Image (spheres, rainbow, N blue to C red):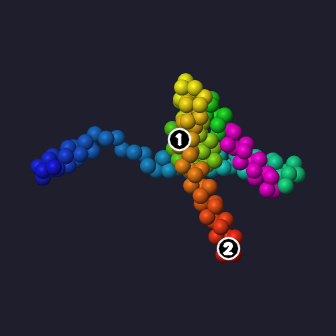
Amino acid sequence: MTKANIREQEAYSAFLEDFRPKRPTLRNIVVAFLTGGLICTAGQGVLSCILSRGMPEKQAYVLTSSIMVFAGAFLTGLGVYDKLGSFAGMGAALPITGFANSVVSPAMEYKHEGFVLGVGARMFQVAGPVIVYATLTATIVSIIKLYVF
């Protein structure tokens, strides 16, 4: 690229800045924080309810995670979680319910291709790397803990 082309591109980019809508950054931060907090509060409520019924703590954690994943997947299936995600951004994507959404959304999108090549192949398109790296990290930490501590 010549220097003239680079200058033209820079001038054009500066020209476009006047027409781009400004992002409501503060609003996005507050909404993401509050939405993520509400999702986590709901999870804490589920955990408290389960613990109040006398379930052991470790089992209650597992059941709470399962319930929250199911809720995220179910709300994605109803189309509610995608609307929440577009409104709240990372506030809806970061909690465990967002993980369920990232697994279910591609599966629903490709269900017309069949259960194996559509749902099965696309289900872990986004979540697959997360599962792989989480498993790898857990293995490494377990080995370090076993031999070092």
Residue 54 drawn at (x, y percent): 88, 51
Q: Contact, CB < 8 Å: mark 1 with mark 2?
A: no
As drawn, is 8 to the left or to the right of 90? left
Residue position for label 1: 125
As drawn, is 27 to the left or to the right of 98? left
Residue 60 drawn at (x, y percent): 79, 51
Residue position for label 2: 147
Residue 24 drawn at (x, y percent): 43, 45
Based on the picture, tell me whether residue 30 belongs to the magenta stretch: no
Residue 149 drawn at (x, y percent): 69, 75
**Which residue is at 64% across, 60% downward?**
138
**Which residue is at 59% across, 58% downward?**
136
**Which residue is at 64% across, 34% downward?**
75
Dividing the picture into quarters, in which one does residue 117 lie?
top right
Q: What kind of element bears circle 2?
A: helix
Q: Which secondary structure type mostly characterizes the magenta part of the structure?
A: helix
N-terminal label among 1 and 2: 1
Q: Which mark is residue 22?
A: none
Q: Amino acid at mark 2?
A: Tyr
Dividing the picture into quarters, in which one does residue 93 lie?
top right
**Which residue is at 73% across, 42% downward?**
67
Q: Give the extent of the magenta segment.
A: 57-71
* Residue 132 at least partly seen: yes
Marks 1/2: CA–CA distance: 34 Å
* Residue 81 at least partly seen: no
Q: What kind of element bears circle 1?
A: loop
